[in-house]
Amino acid sequence: MPKKLALLTTNFFNPAGDRIIMGGAERYQVDLCRLIKKLGMDVEVWQIGDGWTKEFDGVKIRSIPATKSEFNTFPELNMAFYENAMSFDYAIYFILALAFPIVHEKSIAISHGVYWDWPGFHISTGRQEAHQEWIRRMGVALTGPQKLVSVDTNTINFFNGTLPGNYNKWEYIPNYVDTDLFCPKERKEPEGEKVKVLFPRRMVPVRGVNETMRAAEILTRRYPWIEFHFCGRGHDDKVERLMTQWINTQERCFYYWKPFEMMPEIYQQADIVLIPSRSTEGTSLAALEAMACGKPVIAGLAGGLSDIILQGYNGYLIKPSVENLVNAIEELALDKVKSKLMGNRGREVAMSFSKKIWEERWAKAMSEVFR
Amino acid sequence: MPKLTAMMTVKNEGNRYLKRCLEALEKYVDEIVVLDDASTDETPEICLKFPLVKLYRNESSMFLVDESKLREKLWHYTIENKPEWILAIDADELMEESGIKEFPYLIKQKDFNAISFRLFDCWESEEYYRTDGIWNPWLRGFSIYGVKYQPQLADHWPSLKFHCGRFPLAYRKLLSYETTLRIKHLGWIDSNLNKAKYERCLRQDPNFEYMSKEHYESIIYPPEKIKLEKWVELL
C-alpha cells in the first residue's frame, strides 16, 4: 500500500470552489504534488471551503468549512484537518501559520517567504499584545513539524533571530525554474529597434505596480523606443478594469496575461524584467524564469530576492521607488552591452535553481521525515 | 495539436457580420460547424464559400420557438464531427486578434477543460463598448466559450426557451481558465435594430424571468443614460 500524504493549504481554489487563478503558489503546490506522486506516495489536498471535493491535475482537493482566522493563524482549520486527516501517514503544512496549534507526527511546514513585512499586516496585528500573540503562535507552529522548509534565507534568518530554538529544523530549498522550458532565444524583431520592459506580476501594490506605472509614464514620454508590458492578473475584476482604462491613456504600454505555456516566449521577447516587490516576497518564480531566459532583472529589496539577484551582477536590487526604478531601467535600456551581460549571467545563476535540483532537495527532505 | 471546432447557429446574416466572423475564425480553428436556421437570404451561400465550414440547414426556424432545442441540435451536429475542443461563438462575435496566436496554447494546456472570456458589447461603433449596469463586462465576469469535448459528460440542456446557454449544463459547471482575450460582440452596434430586439425580448420574457425589466429597458436608453468606454488593443 502506498503511504498517504495530506497537504493543508488555505485557498488553492476560492472557498466556493468554482474559481482558481494560477499564480506562483498554486504552481508550486501542483509541482510538489506531482513530485510526491513520483516518489510513490498518494497525496490529497485540504483547504477552506464548505465541504466540497474537487480534483485538479489528478489530485483530490477536499474542503473544510473553517474560515475563522485570528492573529493571522487558522486554528479552527488546523484542528479540523488534524482530526479529519487522521488516516494519513504524513502531512505537509503548505503555509507556516497553518501548523498552529497542532500537527501530525510526521510533518513538514513550508515558508514561501516573509509576508509580515507588508504594511497591512501591522494593521491586523498592530497592537503590541496582538503582535506578541502572533509571535507566540508562530513559535508553536515552528515547534510542531519535524522539518521546516523555506524558499529563501531571509525567513530562516528572521526566525533564527526571533525564535532561535528551531535552528536545526530549517531546510533551505529555494524556488526553481524549468531551465529547458525557460531558455534564451533570439528575438523575432531585429535588435536595437525597441526596448521592451516587462512587469510579469499580479497587479497588486506590494508588487510595485503603482511605482512601475508611474515609471512607465515618465520613460515612455522620454524615449519613443521604450515599451512597457504589464503581464498578470489583478486581484479582482475592478483592478483589471482600471489597468485596461489606464492603458487606454498611455502610449506604448500594454496590459494582458498569458497562459503559463506562453510565458517563456513573453520573457524571451523582453529586454528588461521588473520584479520591484516592496514586500511579501520569496525567491520569486517569475524572477527565476526571467533569469533563465537570459534577461537582466531589476528587483525590489524584499524577501528572498537577494538570494537570486546579486546587485550589479545579474540585475539590480533597489528600493522600488519611482525614481530608483526610472534610473535603473534607464541605465539598462541605454547600455545594451551591460544589459546583455547581466542577462547572460542571470541564465548561469538560474541553472543552479533548476527544477531538477529542487526535486532532489525536496525528495531528500521528505525521505528524512516521511519514514 | 488538438483539433478546434467552432460551432454557430446563423439566420439571415447576409448583410451582417458573418463573412468577417468566418474569415477571422479561419485563422485559428480547424473546422466550423454551422447550423443555418432557415435563412431566407444568401447566408448559406456565404457559409459555403468557406472550405472549413460544414453547413447544416433547418427547414423551418427554431430560434424563436425553442432556442435550447436549436442549440442542442447544433451540439449534436458538432459532436458528430469528432471534435476535441469546441468553441461556441455567434456570427456577430469576434475574438481579439491576439487569440490567433494564443489559442494553440489554450487548447494544449491540460489543467482546464474549459476556457472563459469576457464579452464586450460594442455600442454605436466598434470603437466603443457599453459599461453601464450589467453591460459592464467586468461586472458580468467570465463566460465559458470553449470546452474540451468529454463524451462521458451528460449533454442535458436546460428547458429554457430563452437565454438557454451555449453548452450542455455539465460543461457550464467546469472550472475554467479565464483568458485575457476579449470577445467583441457587434450585435448591438446598429441602433436601428435595437428597438426591434427590445420588443422581441419583451415578447419572449414578458414576466422578466430571465433578466430584469430595467435591463431590457436599458436597450433603448437615450444616449445620455448610456456609458461607453473606448476599445483599445491590449497587446
Image (spheres, rainbow, N blue to C red):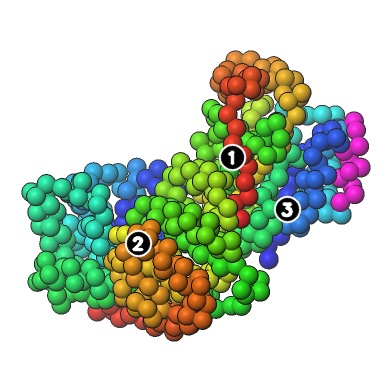
SS for dot 3: strand
Residue B3: quadrant of the picture? bottom right
Q: Residue at x 59, y 77 (%)?
A: A185
SS for dot 1: helix
For badge 1, the amino acid type reads Leu
Position of A232 relative to A310 (above/below): above
For badge 2, the amino acid type reads Pro
Q: Nearer the viewer, residue B112 or A173?
A: A173
Q: Are marks 3 and 1 in contact (CB under 8 Å)?
A: no
Position of A172 relative to B203 (above/below): below
Image disc number at residue A320: 2
Is residue A202 visible in the rendered structure shown here? no
Image disc number at residue B154: none
Q: Residue at x 76, y 24 (%)?
A: B193
Residue A279: quadrant of the picture? bottom left
| Chain letter for mark 2 | A
Q: Which residue is mark 3?
A: B5
Q: Which residue is mark 1?
A: B169
Residues beneath discs 3 and 1 located on the same chain: yes
